[in-house]
Image: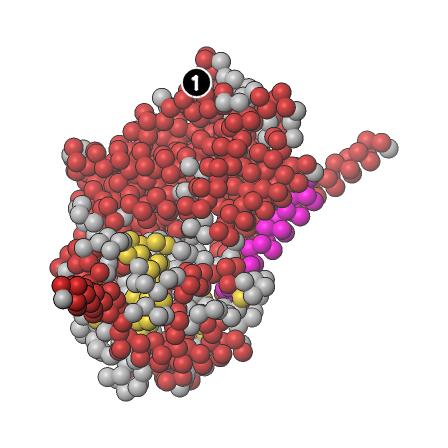
Amino acid sequence: MDVLGSLQYLVTGFGVATTPENLFYCLAGAIVGTLVGVLPGLGPIAGIALLIPATFNLNATSAIIMLAGIYYGAMYGGSTTSILLNVPGETASVMTCIDGYQMARKGRAGPALAICAIGSFVAGGLAILGLAFLAPPLAEAALAFGPPEFFSLMVFGFVVLSNVTGGSLIKSLMMAVVGLIIGTIGLDPVSGNPRFTFGQVSLLGGIEFVAVAIGLFGIGEVLVNVEQPAQVLEQGVLLPRFRDLYPTLQDLKQSLSPILRGAAIGFGVGLVPGPAPVIATYASYMVEKRISAHPEEFGHGAIEGVAGPESANNAACQSAFIPLFVLGIPFAPPTAILLGALLIHGVNPGPAMIAEHPQLFWGVVASMYIGNFILLLLNLPFVPLFANILRIPKKVLLPLVILFCLTGMYSVNNFMLDLWVMLGCGALGYLMRRWAYEGAPLLLALVLGPKLEVAFRQSLMISHGDFAIFADRPLSLLFLLATTGFLVLPLFKIAVQSARRRTAAM
Amino acid sequence: MRTAVGMLLSVVLTLGIVGTGLAADFPTKEVQILIPWAPGGATDLVFRALAASTSKQLGKAVVVVNKAGGGGAVGYTEAMQARPDGYTLVTAVTPLTILPHQATTAFTYQSFEPIINVVEDPAMFQVRADSQWKTLSEFLEYAKKNPDMITVGNSGAGGGVHLIALAFEKAAGVKFNHIPFAGGGPSITALLGGHVHAVSCSPPEGIAHVKAGKLRIIALFSEKRFEAFPAVATVREQGVNFTMGQWRGLAAPKGTPQDVIKTLHDAFKKGMEDPAFVKNAQDMTVNLAYMGPVEFGKVMAADHDRYAKLVQEIKKQ
């Protein structure tokens, strides 16, 4: 696709997106998206699904503009409860809990919330550029990932990301193993036999990730807080001063590079099948921590640890539209629901879609720019309002958090087991906090584990049990070599250092 | 005398009301359709559209409630226990006749009264357009000579299209290497990327790529040819005596009165004929196939037995 031609189409797209009607649906989608993002449990999947029937009487372009708005709008809203209450608003906001919540406890909730909105806006805008100009070749490239490539990529991700928060390696690995074990509950992905369900029908579908995430972080945090003396519970969290509501110039400077890196990471990860926004946030956090001049601040309220992941999840959610539009294949649940919406409006996305429905494709792309801008305008003024939630005395706020978690979680699947899992994980989260175990590796393993297992078994089924399949494929070999390098280099470093020390001692 | 007439009148009146019975009164409130899967899937979309068009016929709202979990088992268990008064219905989809063989479930298809079948998805194998096999006979011939070498992706272990692929290889006397994926989308992606040789799937999966000339339908398991591709012959036409598809309909808990079932059936049948719904279905490449309660019940019974054998076979592997 030539760039000039695309630009021309994009201008036409803006014509489509700026009709009063479409502007209204874009705004509606952005608002609903922010709301479902803010409410714990209720995420973009439920939000889009619930509004599909409301679009039956709209034309396809307006409908998709609104529904897409819900998806990326949720990425803006998801950070809010992570920062204020340590409750991930949706799955891609888990990493934001770590430093965002610490910032809030130091009275810097405002800058954290604002940088999320700004980072999301910048990263979203950059990712849409990629969507507009590079969609077809990128989608083709994504097809190179078959089961063996996918397995090796997952191994790489697993090894690199499992110690993301940088505490004790042993404890991180222990938590990752717990996550892997929880991930095996349910129907076996190859034989369809039930595993670890103990005859319980309700366990056949496995354990809901959102329930574990909210339990470990949100409920666990509430339980830890309850231990505090009574007079502390009478007060709110540390109050923000007015001039602290928005980020300083220094904050913006510090955040710029993480935002740009987050955008690049998120965009790339969004093209790979799997839970892209979640992985993108982990990867971005890891990168920021690795290259930071002050890694010790991470986990204690480093603004880079908020800016990077929040930008990454937005970019990932924009680039997830590429496989959806160009291949007609959703790589993640929210885009799967959007695919349903496209089908119901008579648009069958696939290789011919951009040519067959230019109005729709370019209209939606243009509306994403407008939508991201609306979201920035929508979210920044709310920063003081949201930050003021922290003025509520803890003895009132904490029960409210539990209430929101319970209702939010139940509204996702209307499923009681989810609530018990969430409460159980809350208790587990409390114990983990007491003994300094991290929740993040557990959640990562819970997301990646089942996919890793499936890719591994698929590969071996294709090769009739021959392990060489992982080394025969160049892309797969590359990831395995990178993984080995990552594991061996630190050992090598230690060996060199101790050798030096020995020579120095002599 | 007057009292006698009065009594007689009231008896007649009461009888009249009882006689026309529940059907006349039904429905007095909203009717719920319970969907045992998360929102956004094919079943969910079809029945949300049908609920909209049937509400007009029933005069009361038809509401869709999703109850995901346990690969559908949670929703069916709950629907089975619902009061059999016609106000709680459940979508009866092929997995209803598969799940009871995979795990110990409280329900089978016999725990429900069939109301109506709405959709029958033709199952099919697709290959890449540049695949070495141009015809079904070339494909099967290669499979006969090279057992277990053709990889066939499916949308999930023990799911409908996996079991259909197993049944087809028996009918054709060949052996494929079945690779399960987490859904129809990932299996099509793997086929496009050339990581598997073929996939077993149901529309709308892959259809856009067939239309765009990137994929080809190499085996079609429906009884009649597929409307969207009239040039593609069914496998039965080509000498393999095999048809199998997946159905999506509605059922009510066992014990729901027959006249209520009839009222519901009539309303949903009219809802199916609503032009707005027909257009929705066409846009989704969903194949509408009406069946009344008796016929639908027979199909469920037959598939229940058929899947019992197939599930036993993969469990042995």
Q: Which quadrant: the C terminus of chain A? A: top right
Residue ranking furthest to the front: B1
Q: Is residue A47 magenta?
A: no
Residue drawn at point x = 59 percent, y = 47 percent? A424
What chain does mark 1 sit on?
A
The quarter holding residue A13 reads top left
Is B25 above or below relative to A249? below
Residue drawn at point x = 78 percent, y = 38 percent? A499
Is B289 above or below relative to A44? below
Q: Which residue is at the front of the view, B34 or A475? A: B34
| Residue A418 locus on image (x, y percent) | 50, 50
Residue labelled with disc 1: A246
Residue drawn at point x = 78 percent, y = 37 percent? A498
Q: Is residue A336 visible?
A: yes
Q: Which residue is at the front of the view, A362 or B204? A: B204
Q: Is residue B248 visible?
A: no
Residue ranking furthest to the right: A506
Q: Is residue A172 magenta?
A: yes
Q: Secondary structure at mark 1?
A: loop
| Residue B221 locus on image (x, y percent) | 29, 77
Kind of residue sitting beneath label 1: Tyr
Left or right? Give the position of A135 relative to A282: left
The quarter holding residue B110 reads bottom left
| Residue A217 locus on image (x, y percent) | 56, 38
Q: Residues within 10 Å of mark 1 (few under 14, many from 20)?
A: some
Left or right? Give the position of A216 relative to A29: right
Is B90 above or below relative to A76? below
Magenta region, residue range: A162-190
Left or right? Give the position of A436 relative to B181: right
Residue drawn at point x = 31 percent, y = 47 percent? A50
The quarter holding residue B151 reads bottom left
| Residue A42 locus on image (x, y percent) | 41, 42
